[in-house]
Amino acid sequence: MKEKIKKYIGGIFILIGSFITAYGVFSFSYGRDCGVRDYTISGSECSNPVAYFYSGEVRLLIGLGTILLIAGIFVIKNRKKRNSE
């Protein structure tokens, strides 16, 4: 079992990383705000009343997923390089 995990660890990293990154990218939040917090603007003066944003946790998930994707690519690339020598 351990040998199979070692053999496919690059692919596992890519799968987990792509899932976490996709989940993070599509889990954005939105709020009805004009971006001005000190005073109130009426709806007719606000050019874009809906703001889309990512929370801190989601940004960390996107970063972690990206790191896992890159690590998986490096593992597969280094394994191919070692096998060709």
Image (cartoon, rainbow, N blue to C red):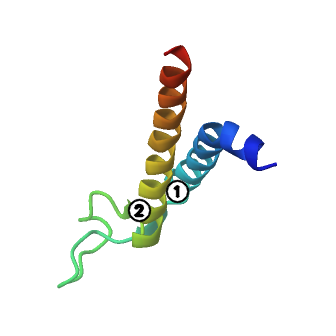
Report x, y in % for residue 51: 37, 63
Number of residue marks:
2
What's the residue type where badge 2 is placed? Arg
Tell me if label 1 and label 2 are in contact, CB under 8 Å.
yes
Which residue is most to the top?
Answer: 84
Q: Is residue 53 above or below residue 11?
A: below
Please give the name of the residue rendered at 27% of the width and 57% of the height, measured from the top-left corner: 47
Report x, y in % for residue 56: 39, 71
Q: Which residue is mark 2?
A: 59
Please give the name of the residue rendered at 41% of the width and 55% of the height, measured from the top-left corner: 63
Asked whether the viewer can see residue 69, the reply is yes
Please give the name of the residue rendered at 22% of the width and 81% of the height, measured from the top-left corner: 37
Residue 11 tag number? none
Q: Which residue is mark 1?
A: 24
Q: Which comes before the other along the chain, label 1 or label 2?
A: 1
Q: Secondary structure at mark 1?
A: helix
- Left or right, 38 with respect to 22, comes to left
Q: Residues within 10 Å of mark 1 (few under 14, many from 20)?
A: many
Q: Relative to the observer, which residue lies in front, 77 or 61?
A: 77
Separation (CA) of disc 1 from disc 2? 7 Å
Please give the name of the residue rendered at 54% of the width and 31% of the height, measured from the top-left corner: 76
